[in-house]
């Protein structure tokens, strides 16, 4: 097991180098945009451009540039300076991470609890009116885009502009005091962000559970005289819930890069809004920083998933 | 002696989108304490459904169950789900065809065995564990104290079936229903498992209902045999009579399609032609008539009932042929006549 974890860790490092290389290629080599031109402002003279090139080291050979990019990234977690205001990307990014983590993990708890509960109820009452209502609701939640749902939520329930004024609205997170205040400010974003995920998880779990409940070992559990509650919630869920872990890990990893839409709609100063701002300004260094951070998140979460899976499924041995 | 299990006119119909599946269509049988009844038939003959129904495992909004199932003086069909749950795994236990898929892949076998006791009895974990070790030893698992912490996939097929048997016998059930317990196993292992079931049955006095498609299996272990076809029992007799003087053409077909060591080498195996009928639209008359080489115009119109071959006889047959015709035809078959 220890060997497997070390192996997976090394592989994660390799993966990170590969991702960095691709990011580097995209931002520095491909003619999407010339970093120097972006940095130089409107109609710069050739001399200014050359000067900036020299400052940024863009006149050096590519491989050398890549090496220093990698070195800065891995040794100092240095993501360079913003092309817009020349501020270093790292401190700003680090500053933005807590809000994103709070948003993502809070939402993850909501969507797992809601999704799993709905999935179980739907599977147990399969074919009944409850099943249909819940699955119909799930389809609606999947179909509703986050920005639409977010705006509707604000329109109806936010304290400032909402019709019913129940929950803190857009921008409340920045003004909130303390963890509890921040949590309160995040209630609506959590609900909005988790809606589609909860729906997907409910459908996934329902399908898994229905399949599991027709397994022979479930028949054995019933034949043993276990109560139906234990058959479903213990024997059934143990098998049907395991694949959820994989999906959950990757979903959380991807959201590390920022729940861009949610953070933008609710004006939460997280990684996602940072990325959104960078994209709208063409700030390549910042986009690159958030991209590398997203990649790191996905790689680490999939590592975590693989390790957890080895514990969850005794048949998996490495 | 009062029978341990008495099934009378049991009907199990499933309502599906394609129509009503008459999986079990009025069967009756009884099992005495300590006795073994073999139920033989092809896939889809209703043999598994009938025994699952005894356990209450076919109850669903889409199934219609009628008749009576009396176990140890109690009517199981009218029992509440909770009453039935207390009977399952405690008084009546069941083992299944595929021992790998029948054990939960994520739980250690020790946990699965202990669960069987602790569901029905108020015993400590340590007591349940001791019982599990004892039972694993009894069914022939080497080093049970160590193996109890293994997962199902760490056992071979035969060993898994031993684990299933140990689990079924954890609570000293009065009746064990074995649904094709050897079908998924290697031939050599099949014999071991059958021997084990037989041995435990004599030691523990458990009655057994052995469900199989293989007459060879019941030849070994059963006291009485019921042959099922299309949801009905078509012939019921003690083992000796069934093998020596079978009276139903379907039983003849089954007997003629199994290889034997005591017949001549050039003796041909005769398969039963055709396929089992749909249980939604059964053939008129005798359900076996489209595949029966002895079918008469009468068997195409008259649905035969299960009747004794002679007044007071325990040998029951459902066939429109007369007893004389059947006796002479079987004599002919034994003598080497081939009707086809």
Image: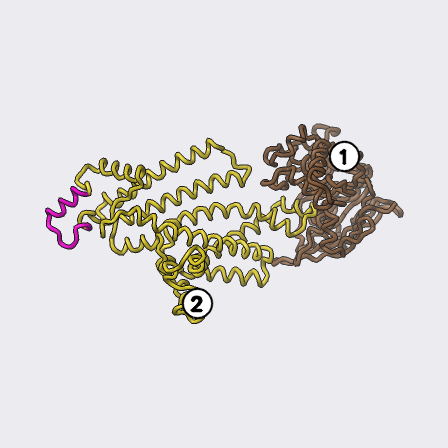
Q: Residue at x 69, y 50 (%)?
A: B57
Q: Which residues are magenta?
A: A38-55
The vertical placement of B315 against A275, above or below, is above
**Viewer can see residue B79:** yes
Q: Is residue B133 left or right of residue B331?
A: left
The circle drawn on residue A270 is none
Residue lying at the far bottom of the rendered structure = A163
- SS for callout 1: helix
User: Looking at the figure, which quarter contains the C terminus of chain B?
Assistant: top right
- Give the chain of mark 1: B
**Where does label 2 land, which residue?**
A157
Residue A7, given in percent of the width and then of the height, sits at 43, 33
> In the figure, is residue B43 to the left or right of A12?
right
Instruction: Identify by letter the chain in yellow.
Output: A
The residue indicated by pointer 1 is B200
Secondary structure of the residue carrying numbered label 2: helix
Q: Are there few (<14), some (14-19), or many (20+) residues within 10 Å of tag 1?
A: some
Residue A293 position, x and y percent, is: 35, 45
Drawing shade for chain B: brown
């Amino acid at each position: 097991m220890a060997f497997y974890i070390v192996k997976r860790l090394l592989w994660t490092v390799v993966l990170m180098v590969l991702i960095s290389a691709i990011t580097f290629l995209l931002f520095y080599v491909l003619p999407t945009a010339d970093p120097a031109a972006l940095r130089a402002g409107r109609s710069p003279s050739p001399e200014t451009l050359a000067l900036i090139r020299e400052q940024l080291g863009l006149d050096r050979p590519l491989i050398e540039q890549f090496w220093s990019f990698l070195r800065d990234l891995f040794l100092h977690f240095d993501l360079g300076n913003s092309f817009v205001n020349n501020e270093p990307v790292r401190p700003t990014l680090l500053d933005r991470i807590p809000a994103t983590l709070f948003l993502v993990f809070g939402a993850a708890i909501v969507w797992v609890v809601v999704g799993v509960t709905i999935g179980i109820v739907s599977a147990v009452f399969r074919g009944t009116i409850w099943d249909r209502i819940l699955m119909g609701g799930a389809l609606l939640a999947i179909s509703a885009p986050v920005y639409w749902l977010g705006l509707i939520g604000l329109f109806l329930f936010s304290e400032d502009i909402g019709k019913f004024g129940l929950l803190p609205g857009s921008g409340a997170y920045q003004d909130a005091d303390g963890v509890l205040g921040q949590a309160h400010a995040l209630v609506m974003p959590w609900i909005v962000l988790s809606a589609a995920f909860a729906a997907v998880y409910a459908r996934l779990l329902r399908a898994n559970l229905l399949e599991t409940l027709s397994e022979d070992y479930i028949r054995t559990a019933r034949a043993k005289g276990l109560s139906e509650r234990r058959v479903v919630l213990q024997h059934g869920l143990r098998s049907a819930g395991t694949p959820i872990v994989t999906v959950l890990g990757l979903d959380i990893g991807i959201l590390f890069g920022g729940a861009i839409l949610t953070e933008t709609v609710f004006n939460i100063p997280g990684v996602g809004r940072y990325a959104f701002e960078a994209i709208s300004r063409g700030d390549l260094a910042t986009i690159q920083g958030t991209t590398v951070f997203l990649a790191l998140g996905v790689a680490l979460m999939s590592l975590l998933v693989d390790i957890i899976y080895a514990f969850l499924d005794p048949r998996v041995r490495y | 002696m009062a029978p341990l299990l008495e099934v009378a006119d049991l009907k199990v119909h499933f309502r599906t989108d394609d129509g009503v599946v008459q999986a079990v269509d009025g069967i009756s049988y009884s099992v005495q304490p300590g006795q073994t009844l073999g139920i033989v038939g092809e896939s889809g003959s209703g043999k598994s459904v009938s025994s699952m129904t005894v356990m209450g495992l076919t109850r669903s909004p889409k199934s219609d169950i009628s008749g009576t199932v009396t176990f140890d003086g109690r009517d199981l069909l009218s029992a509440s789900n909770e009453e039935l749950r207390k009977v399952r795994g405690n008084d009546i236990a069941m083992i299944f065809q595929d021992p790998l898929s029948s054990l939960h892949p994520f739980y250690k076998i020790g946990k699965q065995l202990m669960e069987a006791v602790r569901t029905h009895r108020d015993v400590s974990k340590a007591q349940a564990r001791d019982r599990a070790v004892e039972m694993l030893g009894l069914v022939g698992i080497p080093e049970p104290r160590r193996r109890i912490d293994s997962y199902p996939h760490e056992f071979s097929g035969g060993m898994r079936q031993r684990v299933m048997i140990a689990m079924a016998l954890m609570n000293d059930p009065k009746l064990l229903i074995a649904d094709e317990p050897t079908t998924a196993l290697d031939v050599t292992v099949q014999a071991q498992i059958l021997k084990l079931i037989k041995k435990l049955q004599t030691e523990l006095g458990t009655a057994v209902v052995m469900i199989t498609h293989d007459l060879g299996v019941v030849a070994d272990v059963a006291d009485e045999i019921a042959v099922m076809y299309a949801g009905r029992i078509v012939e019921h007799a003690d083992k000796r009579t069934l093998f020596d003087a079978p009276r139903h053409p379907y039983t003849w077909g089954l007997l003629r399609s199994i290889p034997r060591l005591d017949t001549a080498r050039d003796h041909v195996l005769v398969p039963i032609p055709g396929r089992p009928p749909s249980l939604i639209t059964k053939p008129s008359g005798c359900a076996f008539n489209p595949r029966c080489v002895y079918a008469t115009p009468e068997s195409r119109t008259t649905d035969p009932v299960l009747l004794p071959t002679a007044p007071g006889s325990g040998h029951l047959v459902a066939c429109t042929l007369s007893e004389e015709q059947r006796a002479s035809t079987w004599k002919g078959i034994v003598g080497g006549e081939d009707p086809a």
